[in-house]
Amino acid sequence: MTTVFIAILWCCVQNRLDWQTDTKTALVEMMGFNPDGEEFMSKRNMTFLPNVVDQCAWDEDRFSQLPRSVQRYFHRAFLFTGEPEQFWEDCVKMIRSVTITEEGEILMMNGKWVPYVAKRYFSASPLHAGYVWDAKIRYPVALQLPFDIDVYVRDSFSNGQEDKIARMFGAIPFLNSVARGPAQSARLRWLAYAPVFPTSLLPHEAVGVHWTRENKKGFWPFQEMIRNEATADFIDPQGHSSKVNVKFDSNGLIEHIAAVEENWHFRMSEYKNVGQGILLPSHIESGKQEKNGNFVPHIKVSIKDVEYTYF
């Protein structure tokens, strides 16, 4: 009996260590390299795609062609002073990756909200769009036990593929799935969280985000109305498209992102200055909208800390 217990304990400890190793591997893959350091993309694709650093060169003519609401958002998100001679590159460096420390609640199938803590990692480059969500969910059990069950969940998206895995205590697996299709939902989540790393929302000519003009002429001649919405279309290196409707609040910041082809909605609030020339939402809720128009959140995210790396 003792031998069996020791074997189970050793297996649990080993699986927990493997979890940490697999998370690191997922992070390496997310940034566009496999564990051997080789690029995922072929040379043919790399010659077709524009270099992400080259896309940093800003063209004021392109900026002026964006919807007025989007122009105002960039001025607000990047903490512009509003002076005409001030360009965005004077204030903001292009973000390469972001590490988010977060906590929040998840709505379970039984209708109960359970708390969690997590690290959420993003590759902010549209050429290597991806994320890794490494969370620990404190799930209460119905039995009279002196402890709750810690469920470890890792949801990763890289190279157009989404992987999900969950283990009780980080050792006992009960979910392991791989989405080998276009991973539409994963691309939507990357796009929905982009206000946390807003340089990824800057317009691109090929791979990246494309904004659709929503402006309309006002009653007075040559007067242009600033509407509080626009459409963003994210095109990944494989040519897949994810389109969302974006609504802005009275301050010009993003407050609502809704998927065009799926019933997924994301609400942003409590914008904060993180001290690096960027305003970002510190509270995000995602969920679905019922037929009566009511928004039903499925997860509530509170961002506690953010760390960036830059090109």
Image: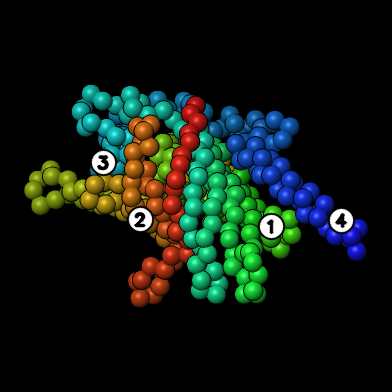
Residue 4 position, x and y percent, is 89, 60
> Mark 3 vs mark 4: which is more N-terminal?
4
Residue 52 position, x and y percent, is 50, 30
Residue 251 position, x and y percent, is 24, 47
Query: Callout 1, which amino acid?
Result: Phe
Q: Residue at x 54, y 52 (%)?
A: 117
Identify the residue position indicated by label 1 in the image.
169
Q: Which of 18 and 290 lies nearest the eye of the viewer?
A: 18
Q: How crowded is mark 4: few (under 14 residues within 10 Å), some or many (20 or more)?
A: few
Query: Which quadrant of the structure image shows residue 171?
Result: bottom right
Would you say residue 17 is visible in this rendering? yes
Separation of residues labelled 2 and 4 (CA atoms):
50 Å
Separation of residues labelled 1 and 3 (CA atoms):
46 Å
* Secondary structure state at the residue bearing disc 4: helix
Separation of residues labelled 3 and 4 (CA atoms):
61 Å
Q: Which residue is drawn at 48% across and 56% down?
A: 104
Residue lying at the far left of the rendered structure: 220
Identify the residue position indicated by label 4 in the image.
7
Query: Callout 4, which amino acid?
Result: Ala
Query: Callout 2, which amino acid?
Result: His
* Secondary structure state at the residue bearing disc 1: loop
Identify the residue position indicated by label 2 in the image.
256
Would you say residue 179 is visible in this rendering? no
> Mark 2 vs mark 4: which is more N-terminal?
4
